[in-house]
Amino acid sequence: MKTRAALFHGAGQPLEVREIDLREPRPHEVLVRVRAVGLCGTDLHVVKGDWDRPKPMVLGHEGAGTVEAVGDDIDSLDVGDTVVLSWAPSCGRCADCRRGRPAACIELQRAIGAGALLDGTTGMEADGEIVYRGTATGALSQLLTIDADVALPLGDDVPLEQAALLGCAALTGVGAVLFQARPEPGSVVLVVGAGGVGQFCVQGARIAGSTEIVCVDPLEARLEQAKRLGATRTATPDELPETLREVAPDGVDVALDAVGAPETTELALRWTRNGGRTVLVGLPAAGERLDLDPAEFVRREKNLTGSMYGSEDPRRALPLLLEHVRSGALELEPLVGPTFPLDDVNEAVDVSLAGSPGRVVVLP
């Protein structure tokens, strides 16, 4: 079948919106009409050339849409169902999948690096040549054939522009707090970075009952957004020392680095109290390294860990997040930034790279 999609050809080159060939759904797959795709930091890493991926590639993995066809072996979804796209299907065989951590699946990680699905195919072509998939998904396409495990049931009460954010940023940010950082009620939490994931970390800390939530970011518009979502204090990097000396002179209980650059991780670890916990949430550019002082972990007994895709199986995490959405505890609408049609995807990328306070969403 034919579909229109945005093809990435290389760093510094505009994405090309054109018609491509898409494979019909196989017995274990479904066909989804993609309605909304959030531009994630993972996509921007590829666009900037921070990560090398095969090309041409359809980027995008944070999405929501409507099921248009189901394979013969599928009885969990029906035509017309609304779904959230999860980029972490489980192979079901490796140790990480068996312990409920499909985002760490070695087969999935290999597939992402190869720009393919778990079985090594892509199901996409243009002019007879293979088209690769970003983050084993390739959501910047009007139609998308995916494994049924990738299409998580949503229900009809969440607008799809908002629901798209549940597919990555919300699961990543809220999950990192609730399932990995696990701050005690009354804790002091520091969130480094107020982009899409950072804003969800702020909300996760609020939901967890943190008394003080400090958010640091160089962009004032993002700090204002973080404040609206539950941050009790905000600061630019220059203002942070004074703010934390007032709020947590001994350091914070939990610090989350929602950026992933070495300097932001160092900042988060620096302001974590003795015995506290630092969680790396954002992904760094390829080749980045941390320079760590062992005394932080021996004499000060700090904990440093990471969180991939919220540290929980998305099939279990999404229903929990939807409960918070429906109760009003987890807000989605304020995080939706400017929206663009597929034909304007390059403008959408530029706005996202410029640091939009809300998630830039493409409407294929």
Image (tube, helix red, strand yellow):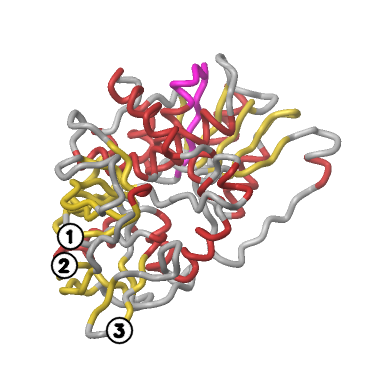
Furthest-front residue in this view: 72
Magenta segment includes 353: no
Task: Give residue 126's position: percent from left, percent from top.
Answer: 24, 80
Residue drawn at point x = 35 percent, y = 23 percent:
324
Residue drawn at point x = 46 percent, y = 26 percent:
233
Q: Quadrant of the N terminus?
A: bottom left
Q: CA distance from mark 1 to mark 3?
A: 19 Å
Mark with earlier residue (2, 3): 2
Residue type for callout 1 = Gln
Dot 2: within a 10 Å radius of its alpha carbon, few (fewer than 14), some, or many (20 or more) residues?
some
- Check disc 3 and report the residue beneath it: 129
Furthest-right residue in this view: 299
Q: Quadrant of residue 99?
A: top right
Q: Are marks 2 and 1 in contact (CB under 8 Å)?
A: yes
Residue type for callout 3 = Glu
Q: Which residues are magenta?
A: 205-217
Query: Is residue 221 visible to the viewer in this orientation of the structure?
Result: no
Task: Give residue 146's position: percent from left, percent from top.
Answer: 31, 56
Q: Is residue 93 left or right of residue 149?
A: right
Location of residue 340 with respect to 171 vertically, above or below: below
Location of residue 118 with respect to 221 vertically, above or below: below
Task: Give residue 76's position: percent from left, percent from top.
Answer: 29, 40
Furthest-bottom residue in this view: 128
- Check disc 2 and report the residue beneath it: 3
Q: CA distance from mark 2 to mark 3?
A: 15 Å
- Check disc 1 and report the residue beneath it: 142
